[in-house]
Image: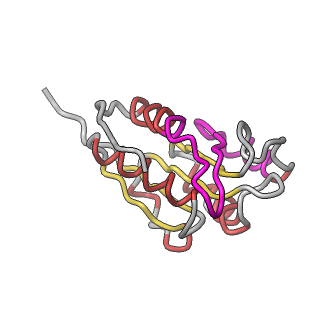
């Protein structure tokens, strides 16, 4: 019986501090604890994606869009992302959608091309922890299950 190698997942954050980074760290920690070979990077220092099966990318959402750095990264790496399973998240003070409304057209257009497995919005903020960590855990579970990873228990931040 052959055992499949663990999935290789790049977890990328569009910001160093803040809720987005905390969510990226949580997802990364959860995936590693379940047996994935996951790496956590800021987008500015993202690795070559050819070595990865999947990419998780997130950042703060303002005015219906991800930060310019994240949008540019996604546009510049369309070719590298086309054969990867892509999971996106946005963080804003509003619950539900990443900005409480609908994403701006440029983000909608990019999402239509990228066809991420999921794009979810989490509540978060600059100065206080408004994040619903159970929602983050549930989303991280869905990523893990999609890659055949076992259940694990990761504490809340």
89 sits to left or right of 96: left
4 or 156, which is in the foreground? 156
Locate the N terminus by quadrant: top left
Residue 6, how many percent across, how many down?
28, 43
Residue extent of the magenta highlight: 107-136
Dividing the picture into quarters, in which one does residue 117 lie? top right
132 sits to left or right of 69: left
Residue 157, how many percent across, how many down?
43, 51
Magenta span contains residue 114: yes
- From this view, report whether residue 44 is shown above or below residue 119: below
- Most distant residue in the left direction: 1
Residue 46, how many percent across, how many down?
49, 67
Magenta span contains residue 138: no
User: Residue visible at 51% across and 40% down?
Assistant: 136
15 or 70, which is in the foreground? 15
21 sits to left or right of 141: right
Q: How is the image coloured?
A: secondary structure
User: Residue visible at 72% across and 55% down?
Assistant: 61
- Most distant residue in the top direction: 1
User: Residue visible at 16% across and 31% down?
Assistant: 2
Dividing the picture into quarters, in which one does residue 97 lie? top right
Count of residue discs: 0
- From this view, report whether residue 2 is shown above or below residue 10: above
- From this view, report whether residue 88 is shown above or below residue 73: above
User: Residue visible at 41% across and 53% down?
Assistant: 52
- Most distant residue in the right direction: 105
- Most distant residue in the bottom direction: 44
90 or 126, which is in the foreground? 126
């Amino acid at each position: 019986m052959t055992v499949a190698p663990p999935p290789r997942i790049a977890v990328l954050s569009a910001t160093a501090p803040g809720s987005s980074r905390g969510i990226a760290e949580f997802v990364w920690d959860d995936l590693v604890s379940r047996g994935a070979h996951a790496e956590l990077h800021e987008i500015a220092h993202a690795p070559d994606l050819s070595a990865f099966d999947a990419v998780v990318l997130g950042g703060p959402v303002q005015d219906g869009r991800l930060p310019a750095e994240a949008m540019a990264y996604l546009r510049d790496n369309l070719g590298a992302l086309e054969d990867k399973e892509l999971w996106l998240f946005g963080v804003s003070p509003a619950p539900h959608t990443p900005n409480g409304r609908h994403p701006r057209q440029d983000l909608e257009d990019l999402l239509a091309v990228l066809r991420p497995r999921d794009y979810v919005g989490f509540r978060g903020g600059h100065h206080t922890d408004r994040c619903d960590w159970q929602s983050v855990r549930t989303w991280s579970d869905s990523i893990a299950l999609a890659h055949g990873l076992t259940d694990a228990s990761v504490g809340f931040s």
